Image (cartoon, rainbow, N blue to C red):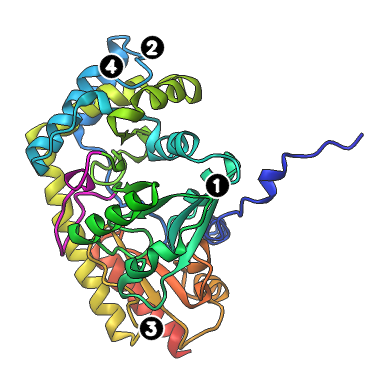
Amino acid sequence: MTQSLAKRVEQIAPFQVMAVMARAKQLQAQGEDVIHLEVGEPDFVAPKAVNDAGQAAIANAQTGYTAATGLPELRQAISDFYQTRYQVDVAPERIIVTPGASGALILLSSLMADVGSEVLMPDPCYPCNRNFLTQVGAQARMLDCSANPDFAIDLDTLAQQWQAHTTGLWLASPANPTGSVLSKEYVAKAWQIVQQQGGHLLVDEIYQGLVFEGEDFTALSVSEDIFVVNSFSKYFAMTGWRLGWIVVPEWAVEGATKLAQNLFISAPSIAQYAALKAFDQDVLAECEARRQTLASRRATLIAGIERLGLPVAASPQGAFYIYVDVSSLTDDAMQWSLDLLEQEFVALTPGADFGQRDAHKYVRFAYTCDDARIEEALQRIERFIAA
């Protein structure tokens, strides 16, 4: 008898960037100097105070299960952070600490999407979102945003997109891969439309704090009935600690808690104790200094892309990405990225990972290394284009 995998596995597309990353590692192993502008992880590590707190947790044997929803003191610290930074009251009982933002998105998919239902999201967007929905028997329907400023969904036609089996809308701000930032007015209008349709709204805020233009706000300031996902990975540079959270409406707390108990028991205890230090004033000051460093890198990369004559496809107001149109150079951004890697040892992310409509036209640049390396990468790309 031939064994087979679940059919849902066939519906989940692999990351195309993995082919770029695998080849980049091979080239590095061969001694080549590869510049990584493809990875969504800056060259920062968690602040020392956070690392020290994690080590202390191990030394103090604080390594067992926590409550499924997270350490009470961490949930309170997150609640206090919303009040201090954004002047928004968020009861700690509505905050569920998860194994990364991915755990939060899996929880939300299980909580709000039935088999056969669909969730609307912009094209392009973070690819795992649609795969999380596939895992629960639902599906994503991506709305073509190529003609809209900053690839934002056209809210004037959103209600017309809603169907009988549509259950929600997922947005992100700042967004991956574009770096675009939604306005509070946009989120408020989206929520009004979603409410009228009887659906749920998720706003992915995992790059919150990394805003260079526009307002750094939380969708929770619009309504406490909006679902919000966040993470310690980006602003706090705690990627490998695998720690995030989701804020749910009060009416969804019981269901979300039950799912958290079953899906992951609890988030990593060591990471939670470490994250308690993330909200100390000296750590927040260090994170702000890093944001300023990213702002400098952003300016360097934008200026360099403009010198190359390549159009920036969306206003990169936040996160650490720039989405660039390379259709004047190629009709296959994936192959172009592979060729660039082979010839000039610069790694970029092809747009096919993020979208469907015209994805072959775009590449994502990540300004995750220092200014000198970015300048070197730009010189290599210029040489590659001229060849």
For residue 279, above or below residue 362: above
Dominant SS in magenta:
loop
Q: Which mark is residue 85?
A: none
* Residue behind mark 2: 64
Residue 290 falls within the magenta-colored stretch: no
Disc 4 target residue:
57
Q: Tell whether 149 sits left or right of 335.
A: left
Q: Position of residue 150 (x, y in %)?
A: 31, 71
User: Which residue extends farthest top?
Assistant: 61
Position of 118 with respect to 272 (left or right) is: right
Q: Along the polypeptide, which appears first: circle 2 or circle 4?
A: 4
Q: Which residue is mark 1?
A: 117
Name the N-terminal-most of marks 1 and 4. 4
Distance of label 3 from label 1 (alpha carbons): 46 Å
Q: CA distance from mark 2 to mark 4?
A: 10 Å
Residue picked out by circle 3: 382
Q: Quadrant of residue 81?
A: top left
